[in-house]
Image (cartoon, grey):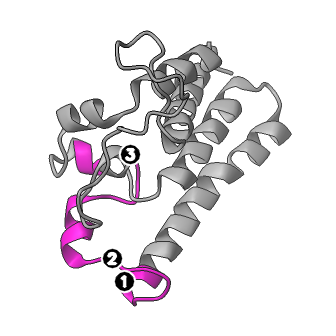
Amino acid sequence: PSLALGSALTCVGLVGAFNLAPALANPMSDDFTGCPLDLKAARAEKPTDVVGLERVTRHPQFWSLGFLGLGCAAMTPFAGTAAAALGFPLVALVNGTHLDSRHRRGMGGSLSVEREAKTSGVPFVALLRGRQAWAPLLDELKPVNSVLALGASA
């Protein structure tokens, strides 16, 4: 087992999961209203815009769980536990591919050729191939949520 690799993968999964939740307000900011939700958080201007975790993958819900599974599999000394945990990234890959197939056919959503060309189903592929940029992703992540995720993963 690799504690460092498992911890890193778990951290990626938790940051993803926490960023899927509504943005939390920073209680230390000057414009804090007392509401724990940041109602002024950035949102996509058009439904076709690629923002936030969609820059990493078209299926952040699936892959957040997938990375948690990879982290658990990397840290456990037990083959059975590792095999069960590896089911999560497998489900993310299969379900993401299936969902893309359905959306291409207009079943339950849509996936345009343009959107498919600038995003990826597998995490980080669009970023590594230059179809998405890292700087906007870092600007669009929810800072309070991300800090809480890092704290939870420690």
The amino acid pointed to by label 1 is Arg
Distance between the alpha carbons at the discs numbered 1 and 2: 5 Å
Disc sitting over residue 67 in the figure: none
Q: Amino acid at mark 2?
A: Leu
Considering only order in the chain, which callout, 1 or 3, is on the residue closer to the N terminus?
3
- Residue at the image point whose x is 27% and y is 37% from the top: 137
Q: Residue sitting at 62 percent across and 19 percent down?
A: 153
Q: Is residue 39 left or right of residue 152?
A: left
Q: Residue at x 48, y 70 (%)?
A: 97
Expressed as whole percent of the image width and height from the top left, the position of residue 3 reads 64, 16
Q: Earlier in the sequence, mark 3 or mark 2?
A: 3
Q: Residues within 10 Å of mark 1 (few under 14, many from 20)?
A: some
Image quadrant containing the N terminus: top right
Q: Earlier in the sequence, mark 1 or mark 2?
A: 1
Q: Quadrant of the C terminus?
A: top right
Residue 138 on image: x %, y % = 28, 30
For marks 3 and 1, give the one nearer the viewer. 3
Tell me: 103 left or right of 117.
Answer: right
Magenta stretch, residue numbers: 102-127
Task: Say if 33 sits above or below 42 in the image.
Answer: above
The residue wearing badge 1 is 104
Residue at the front extreme of this rendering: 33
Vertical side of 22 occupied by 28: above or below: above
Reading the image, the residue beneath label 2 is 111
Identify the residue under disc 3: 53
Instruction: Assess whether residue 96 is covered by the magenta stretch.
Output: no
Check if mark 1's residue and mark 2's residue have beta carbons within 8 Å. yes
Name the foreground residue: 22 vs 119.
22
Residue shown at 40% from the left, 89% from the top:
106
Label 2: how many Cα within 10 Å (few below 14, some 14–19, many 20+): some
Badge 2 marks a residue whose secondary structure is: loop
